[in-house]
Amino acid sequence: MEQTEKTQSMKDRILYESLKLFADNGYAAVSTRMIAKAVEASDAVIYKHFKNKREILDTILERCKTQYLAKRNTVKLATMCWDEVEKICMDMFAFQTQDEWIVLYRKLLIVEQYKDPQMAMLYRRMFIEGPLESLEGMFHILIEQGYMKKGNPMVYAMELYAPFFLFHTVEGKSEELLQNLEEHVRLFRKNVRELQ
């Protein structure tokens, strides 16, 4: 049992250090030797866990995607209510800007999207289309329930999400920024709320 935990621990270290290296330097600039140095191990240890550098990258991409979708799927659209919109927005923003894996994942995708169409597609799906589609679904339900004015749910989604997307990559989120984003959500809710 202890050997399995050590093996998993080394595998996790390889993945995390590789993600950091890929995000900082780009995938092509990182060698397995650099990864081995970062985890303070030999090249042989890297190849014990992974066939090659591409398998490391693919494992990182799948792990981050799974982690991101698991968090996003905690929002139960069918049972949510209008008062939860602000909390959902701020929780997802905190996750996307404070979870170390997700921050590095986004940075990696931003860097690599210009070199690799798969990375560009992942970036669009995870950080643009996915959030917009989730918000669109949420707003569609809220419009049907009479909480929001009738309108195009995708346009509402774009309006709400744009400032969050803009500030994803800003280092050192200030308290003032967070307060401004919270106010943005409150004003958005006020502007689209159906008068009853």
Image (cartoon, rainbow, N blue to C red):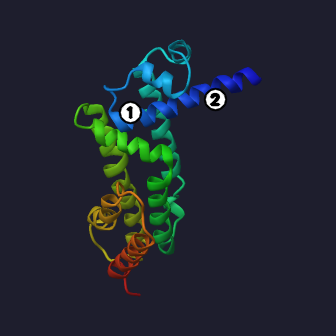
What residue is shown at x 39% (from left), y 70% (from top)?
177
The residue at the point 52 percent across, 51 percent down is 71
Using the rendered view, name the quadrant where residue 21 is placed.
top left
Precedes in sequence: disc 1 or disc 2: 2
Helix or strand or loop: what does disc 1 sit on? helix
- In the rendered image of this protein, does residue 12 appear above or below residue 127? above
Which quadrant does the N terminus fall into?
Answer: top right
SS at badge 2: helix
Relative side of 107 to 5, left or right: left
Question: What's under tag 2, amino acid-wise?
Answer: Ser
Q: Nearer the viewer, residue 32 or 123?
A: 32
Quadrant in which residue 20 is drawn: top left
Residue type beneath disc 1: Phe
Residue under numbered circle 1:
22
The residue singled out by tag 2 in the image is 9
**Residue 47, horizontal then vertical, whole percent:** 51, 14
Would you place residue 164 above or below residue 62 in this image?
below
Local crowd size for mark 2, using a 10 Å CA cut-off: few (<14), some (14–19), many (≥20): few
Q: Quadrant of the C terminus?
A: bottom left
* Residue at the extreme right: 1
